Image (cartoon, rainbow, N blue to C red):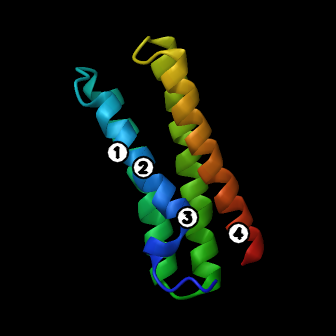
Amino acid sequence: MKIERFEDIIAWKKSRILVKDIYKLVDESKDYGFRDQMRRASVSIMNNIAEGFERKSNKEFKQFLFIAKGSAAEVKSMLYVALDLAYLDKEKFDELFDLTEEITKILSGLIKTL
C-alpha cells in the first residue's frame, strides 16, 4: 500500500489516539509543568511524523521519524513519573505505555523500510 497522506500512516493514527488519552489524563492536573510536558511530548510524536512525511524526502522523513521515536521515549519516561507520583494507576499506565511502545515499534519498522 502506497502512503499518499500522513493521515494514512498507522503510527500517526495511533499517535493521535495517544494524544487524546494523554490530554484526558492530565486535563485536571495542577502540576502544570508535568501536564504541559506530557502534552508537548505526545503531540511531538504525531507532528514529527506529519512534518517528516510532508518533506517528500525519504532522508528527511527518516530523520523526523527518529525525532518522533525520541518523543515516544519521553512519553514513556513521563508515564513512569506519573505512576510514581500516583497521577495514574497501574492499569492506565500499562495501557498508555503499551500504546506508546506499539507506536515506537511501527516507527522502527518504517525507518527500516526507508
Mark number displayed over residue 17: 2
SS category of the residue bearing label 2: helix
In the image, residue 108 lies at what x, y percent?
71, 60
Amino acid type at image mark 1: Lys
Q: Are marks 1 and 4 in contact (CB under 8 Å)?
A: no
Q: Earlier in the sequence, mark 1 or mark 4?
A: 1
The residue that disc 4 covers is: 111
Q: State the CA–CA distance, disc 2 to disc 4.
A: 21 Å
Q: Are marks 1 and 2 in contact (CB under 8 Å)?
A: yes
Q: State the CA–CA distance, disc 1 to disc 3.
A: 16 Å
The residue that disc 3 covers is: 10
Q: Earlier in the sequence, mark 3 or mark 2?
A: 3
Mark 4 crowdedness (10 Å alpha carbons): few <14, some 14-19, many ≥20? some
Q: Are marks 2 and 4 in contact (CB under 8 Å)?
A: no
Q: State the CA–CA distance, disc 1 to disc 2.
A: 5 Å
Q: Is residue 85 visible?
A: yes
In the image, residue 113 lies at what x, y percent?
75, 75
SS category of the residue bearing label 1: helix
The residue that disc 1 covers is: 20
In this rendering, which labeled residue sits more in front, label 1 or label 4?
1
